[in-house]
Amino acid sequence: MAYLLEVDAVTLRYKTPESIITATNKVSFNVNSGDRFVLLGPSGCGKSTLLKAVGGYLAPEEGEIRIKGKAVRKPGADRMMVFQEFDQLLPWKTVLENVMFPLLAARKMPRKEAQERARAYVEKVHLGQFADSYTHTLSGGMKQRVAIARGMSMEPDILLMDEPFAALDALTRRQMQDELLQLWEDTRFTVMFVTHSIAEAIRIGNRILLLSPHPGEVKAEVSDVESVADDAAAAAELEQEIHGLLFDPQGAHTE
Ligand SMILES: Nc1ncnc2c1ncn2[C@@H]1O[C@H](COP(=O)(O)OP(=O)(O)OP(=O)(O)O)[C@@H](O)[C@H]1O
């Protein structure tokens, strides 16, 4: 079976006038269609940088990233991003207009069609009553739902989520995780999700890629995450196991 996304020995570097920073070193992994693929690792291991590279915002120094077999060279409507920040929305537009915006700008569909599609996704994230509200009047969780609806309404090949719930309080975060899983049950989209919370990775993912600290390298992949869903004891055990893999200085290389 062909992979939806291939990240093939990718090294990513930032060059500043003073120094060269290697964010990831020869990272390889594949994502299948319908995966909830989680990148997990300590702060600074290059998770966000990898997501940006998949988004087409940063070119690999070595290696290649391919979507449906084609090398990624620039951003595209086939890869939509959802960020942690609440200010990723346009405050002078309503909820519905925010969701419509990329449909009109990038997909260039007729206004009526964009409006219908946007409304359907606004309903999906339970914001139907707030369709005409301005986004600055919404709570943090509601703003993140708008950002998710906006990403999903483009019906991308892959939704790229960079710690989308990290700035929310614990209860809202838990609720948003459940809602994301429900959305996934309904539509079976493909998502790549960055987090540094082991518990969140286990709740969200069906596969988890563990990255070592700076520069990020693949430590291991956990691919049977769903086997612990609905089993709190097994999830706690997996959490311990992942903690050990992430923080064991020897690592557990899978290559
Ligand atoms: N714009 C930039 N210019 C220079 N270095 C950067 C830039 N962005 C990130 N870095 C560096 O690249 C490395 C990886 O950063 P990145 O933000 O991808 O890590 P992360 O795993 O997402 O961390 P966190 O969980 O804290 O967000 C870090 O050493 C960071 O300092």
Image: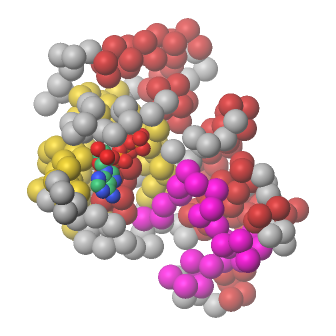
Location of residue 121 in the rendering, given as x and y in whole percent from the top left corner: 69, 64
Q: Is residue 131 left or right of residue 12?
A: right
- 125 lies left or right of 66: right
Q: Nearer the viewer, residue 131 or 42?
A: 42
237 versus 204 height, above or below:
above
Can residue 170 be seen by looking at this rendering? yes
Q: Is residue 40 found inside the magenta-colored segment of the image?
A: no
Residue at point 70%, 57% (across, down): 143
**Quadrant hosting residue 53:** bottom left
Quick check: 187 left or right of 132? left
Residue that protrudes farthest toward the bottom in the picture: 110
Left or right for 59, reference 118:
left
Q: Can you name the residue that lies furthest to the right here?
A: 129
Name the quarter where the C terminus is drawn.
top left
Q: Could one spot residue 191 in this view of the protein?
A: no
Residue 96, how many percent across, how many down?
Answer: 75, 73
For image coordinates 18% across by 57% down, the residue present is: 18
Image coloring type: secondary structure
Q: Position of residue 176 (x, y in %)?
A: 67, 42
- Tell me which corner region of the image, top left, top right, bottom left or bottom right, holds residue 130: bottom right
Q: Residue furthest front?
A: 18
Q: How many marks?
A: 0
Toward the viewer: 214 or 230?
214
Q: Is residue 45 above or below residue 247?
A: below
Q: Residue at x 27, y 32 (%)?
A: 213
Please tell me which residue is depicted at 53% across the width and 57% down the height of the picture.
82
Classify residue 100 by image quadrant.
bottom right
91 is within the stretch colored magenta = yes
Up the image or down, 13 lies above or below 199; here it is: below
| Residue 66 percent coordinates (x, y) | 24, 61
Q: Write down the region rendered in magenta.
A: 79-106
